[in-house]
Amino acid sequence: MKNNIRVERARVRMSQQELAEKAGVIRQTIAAIEQGRFNPSTVLALKIACIFGLTVEQIFELEDSDWEK
Amino acid sequence: MLPHSWKIVGRVLLALCLLLFVSCFRAVVHDMFLVNSAQGYDSFGAGWASSLVVIFFSIGVVLLAFSQEYREDERIIHIRQQALARTVILYIIVMALNLIANLVLVRMLSQDSLGPVMMVKRAFLCVPAFILYYQLIFKLSLWSENKKLSRDEE
């Protein structure tokens, strides 16, 4: 699953640590999501979208490989 | 999951377990528990200490393994679940091999096999060791994941 969390963070000038604190997770979790190493739960994805003032679909995008699983 | 503070209790119990184990070992080696009796060696002293070692070890690893990390979130829980799944699979494989080996020994060597009660007891006694294995796998996975993240961030 692709995401543009890094782009959105840069847009609002927010660090990973700040985003993590607002979302109620640790910094490494945000880093793992950005790098595609970890898929967030629905709640976490909604929280991140809410923090940026966007919808989940504007931040996360399915890839072809996700359909193959 | 238990609160993070229970990890301290777990560590203390494991430290006590290690101290007792070392004492037991030294006592057996240096014959500290010898009792002057007509029967000779009396292992009563080593017996109660070794029971305490088992009890402290069992409770200590359970507290250590099933207490929350200082900061725990869904990614940590995900890694924890993967470590637990691996441990359970290994436990099942080891117990199956144990059962097969026991049955094979009966046929090959005409030895008395362990009864079902002994086999269940043996399976139960192995559980703390497998819980320790789970904790090691979890910590290793967590360290490995965090290392990959740091490397990719650079």
Image: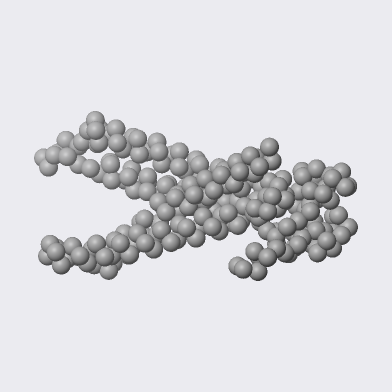
The answer to whether residue B77 of the structure is visible from this angle is yes
Left or right for B7, reference B118: right
Residue found 56% across the figure and 44% down from its top? B144
Q: Residue furthest front?
A: A64
* Whether residue B2 can be seen here: no
| Residue B120 appears left or right of B60 | left
Question: Residue B35, relative to residue A64: is it above or below?
Answer: above
Which residue is at a point 11% across and 40% down the rendered structure image? B38
Protein image colouring: one colour
Instruction: Provide residue B28's location: percent of width, then percent of height.
Output: 25, 36
Q: Position of residue A47 (x, y in %)?
A: 80, 58
Which quarter of the figure has residue B48?
top left
Residue at the (69%, 41%) spot, across then down:
B153
Occupied quadrant, residue B79: bottom right
The one of B45 and A43 positioned closer to us in this rendering:
A43
User: Horizontal placement of B13 versus A42: left or right?
Assistant: left
Displayed quadrant of residue B47: top left
In which quadrant will I find the C terminus of chain B?
top right
Front position in the image: B119 or B74 = B74
Residue at 31% across / 59% down in the picture?
B122
Residue B9 point in image, percent of width and height? 53, 44
Q: Position of residue B116 (x, y in %)?
A: 27, 68
Quadrant where the N terminus of chain B is found in the figure: bottom right
The relative height of residue B49 versus residue B75 in the rendered view (above or below) is: above
Q: Is B116 left, or right, of A36 in this rendering?
A: left
Seen from the viewer's position, the closer of residues B15 and A19 is A19
